[in-house]
Each structure stands twice: as structure tokens, then as C-alpha cells.
Amino acid sequence: MANYADTSNDNGGHAVAHRFYGSLLFFLPDFERAKEHLESAIASYEQLNSERLVDEYGHDPKVLSLLFLAQVQNYRGYPDRTVPLVHEAITPAESLNFPYGTAHAHWIASQTFLDINDFGESGQHSKKILTISEEKRFPFFSCIGAILSGWAGHCVQDPEAFKQLEHNFRRLETISPGMVTLQHIATLIDALIREQQFDQAKRRILDAVNDSNKIGCKYRLPEFIRLKGLCLLAEKKADLHEVENIFLESLNLARQHKAKLWELRTANSLARVWGDQKERQKAYDLL
């Protein structure tokens, strides 16, 4: 589709095709190629500068390209580039007479800030999702907004937030099993670990790893493996050698994916293990 669009002399079709292809490459992941296609989509849209594509294709390719590009930059290790891209996307998204598309934009924005543990910004966007879904009766986005706001609330120790997150994740599994559930399962796993429900967290991690490999959506796989290491580390008689190997597996996979976000996160987890084992120089060198 992207190759055809390159020869079609149709900027609108070119923007839509490269937006779709760029977002699919993000999920694989192939962040470098995703960046190229998303930037190409934005450039084509700029030449067109038309909102008619919302009516024709059901989304604004520039808004979604900017938001997926923000996620790509996040994972590549450039959070300073992420925030301006999100803000650039949200302004036109809120001006569209297209509530579903606006909710979709806030969904990606909330998820983007969640990935860098900015629960304040993530929570603000999730509240906007909930407002839109309540007004327009979007059950899908109602689940998404509640999961994301539940995670943000759990981070600030809201006593009701975990139940909200867990309940709405189960709803999401019924409404949209598969790809979308996989995008949000790390949120539930993180909360389960915070709640010290390690056995349930391990079951969810196993599901996440299996589904990642089955669907071919592996952009979060290094993080799932790191979370597995955290669960084992929490055991009373943790096998530190096994934990170290799991963290190394996560670290190597993050490097293969060129995912600096996960590489840094796993490096911190592994460095703590080495530091606790009095291997501080080794930990220092890694960081």
C-alpha cells in the first residue's frame, strides 16, 4: 500500500498509507523505519492541509502520525522530543468535530506519558477520554480511560484505583481481546507488583509474552521480561543468578530493538541487583 501510494500522486492517500505502515512498524518494533514513514505521512499531509481525510478514512493521519512519532521517540530514548509532538497533535485533535478521533488521540497521549511514568499528564489525558466516552457512549474508550486513570491513581496511592484498573481490564478483555489488551496488560502487571500480588502478576506476564510472540507485536516484550525478573526478585529465597539472567535477556532484547527506554529501565533493575551483591563497579559501568 505504501509503495503504491508513493507513485499515485495523491498526497491524501500517501499520508494515510504511510501513517498505517509507520504505526505497524512501531508495534513490531522497527522504530527507525517507523520514524521514516510517519515523518513521510506528516510531510504529505502538510502539502495537502485538508481535514477531509477524517470523513474519508475515519481518522486524521497527521494527528495519529504525530502521536505515533512521539511514541517512537519515547522508545528511542528521546523524551524531550516526545512532549512537543504530543502537544502538536492534541491541539488539532481537539478542534476536530470527531469525538472518536479526539478520544483516540488522548488515548495514545495518555499511554505515551504512562511509558515515562508521568502519571500526572497521563491522568489528565485519561480523564478527557472518560469525559468523551461518557458523553458519546463509547464503551471501548470507557475501558481504556478507566484503565489509564486507574494506573495514574494507583501511582498516587488512591485506594480505589487498583480495583478500577483491574475491573476495567477484565471488561477490555471481553470487548477487545488480543492486540489492544496486549497494549495495556503491562499497566495491570505493574499495579499487581505494586500490590505484591506476584503470583497473579507472573501469570499475566506469561500470557503477555505468549501473546506478544503469537501476534508478532513485540514492542513491549523487553519490559514484560524485566517485570518477570522483578517478580522473581520479590520471592523470599530469590535465585539471584536466574534473576540476573532474566534481566540480561531483557537488556539484550531491548538493544536488539534499539529501545533505549526499556534498555535504561532494565539496566537500572540489573544494576540494583549487582549493587546489592557488592558488585558496585559492575553496576556503575552498566549505567
Image (cartoon, helix red, strand yellow):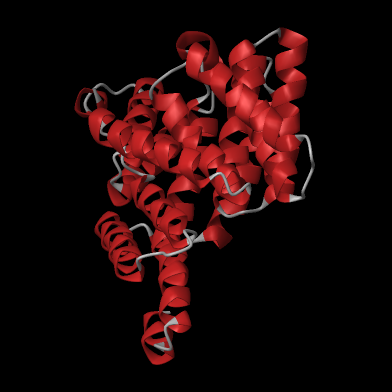
Point 62% across, 21% down: residue: 143
Which sits in the foreground, 110 or 157? 157
Point 62% across, 16% down: residue: 100
Q: Is residue 206 above or below residue 97?
A: below
The location of residue 252, given as percent across then percent down, is: 26, 63
Asked which quadrant contains residue 167, the reply is: top right
Count of numbered marks: 0
Q: Quarter holding the N terminus?
A: top left
Task: Tell me if I can see residue 233 in this picture.
Answer: yes
Task: Give left or right: position of 245 versus 187.
Answer: left
Q: Residue reaching furthest bottom? A: 281
Q: Quarter holding the C terminus?
A: bottom left
Asked which quadrant contains residue 220, the reply is: top left
The location of residue 72, given as percent across then percent down, is: 43, 48
The location of residue 148, given as percent across then percent down, is: 64, 35
Which sits in the foreground, 198 or 158? 198
Asked which quadrant contains residue 240, the reply is: bottom left
Point 28% across, 46% down: residue: 30
Task: Give left or right: position of 193 versus 233.
Answer: right
Q: Is residue 233 above or below residue 15?
A: below
The location of residue 2, given as percent across then percent down, is: 25, 28
Task: Tell me if I can see residue 91 in this picture.
Answer: no
